[in-house]
Image: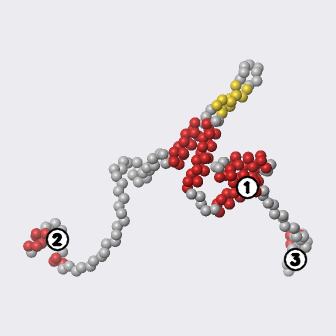
Amino acid sequence: MGEEVAETSPALLMPTTESAPKKPPRPVRFIPRERLDLVERMYLAGKSRQKITREVCDNFKVCSRTARHYIAIIEERLAALPKPPPEATAQRVEAMLLEAYELARDSVQRLVVSKGKNMPSVVEEYPQANVGVMVTVASRLADLHGVLAPQKLDVTSGGAKVAAVVILPPLDPMPVTVSTVAPDQLPVPGASADDSAGD
């Protein structure tokens, strides 16, 4: 019984490379330079990804997936550059924190207010700062600028009070000297030096 291939076998149904028509290569699409310039300018200004995506979608009438692709291109390009100095990163973080603080300060609270019996309810907005976010941002800014003292974390004492922590320098290896001593010249424990000298 040799191997026979049935007519419904996938090997017969799949076209071979000789008979399959070749697809023409996809044309290369170029991204207009002004789009990437806008994304790079906003990214370096510390704007959030959502804000950049929204701005690109509104300005160039592209979908959010395309805008996120532009952001990924800019991030890849910037990652290939030499690492920025820590001051530049600190400025970007500071810009993002200040934007979060501004959004938290300007937030509103929406309340449904009833105008009376058989009257429709109305949604009214009242200024309501998000104080929790504002405090968190202020704390992060203080950490960023080194205003707060570093916190000490003790992981060795189990919560007990520690009087002092002393860090000793590493010990140098002592040279090993070998000497021979007669057994009667060995010091006797508990005997004073005068006792052994008088013998």
Q: Residues within 10 Å of mark 1 (few under 14, many from 20)?
A: some
CA gap, disc 1 to disc 3?
59 Å
Residue 150 placement (x, y as % from top left): 45, 49
Secondary structure of residue under mark 1: helix
Query: Quick check: 78 above or below 96?
Result: below
Looking at the rendered structure, the kind of residue marked 2 is: Val
Q: Nearer the viewer, mark 1 or mark 3?
A: 1
Give the residue number, with chain letter if any, for mark 3: 4
- Say if residue 9 shows up in the picture: no
Residue in view at x 64 percent, y 39 percent: 103
Q: Is residue 70 above or below residue 192?
A: above
Mark 1 or mark 3, earlier in chain: 3
Question: What's the amino acid at mark 3?
Answer: Glu
Q: Residues within 10 Å of mark 3 (few under 14, many from 20)?
A: few
- Please tell me the numbered disc located at residue 36: 1
Q: Name the image quarter holding the N terminus.
A: bottom right
Q: Which residue is mark 2?
A: 188
Position in image of residue 152 (x %, y %): 43, 49
Residue at position x 73%, y 46% from top?
54
Check contact, mark 1 vs mark 3: CB within 8 A: no
- Residue 13 x %, y %: 89, 69
Q: Residue furthest left?
A: 198
- Residue beneath the point at 68% across and 50% down: 42
Front label number (3 vs 2)? 2
Quadrant housing the C terminus = bottom left
Left or right of 89, for residue 151: left
Q: Residue 92 at what x, y percent from top left?
A: 60, 50
Label 2: state its secondary structure: loop
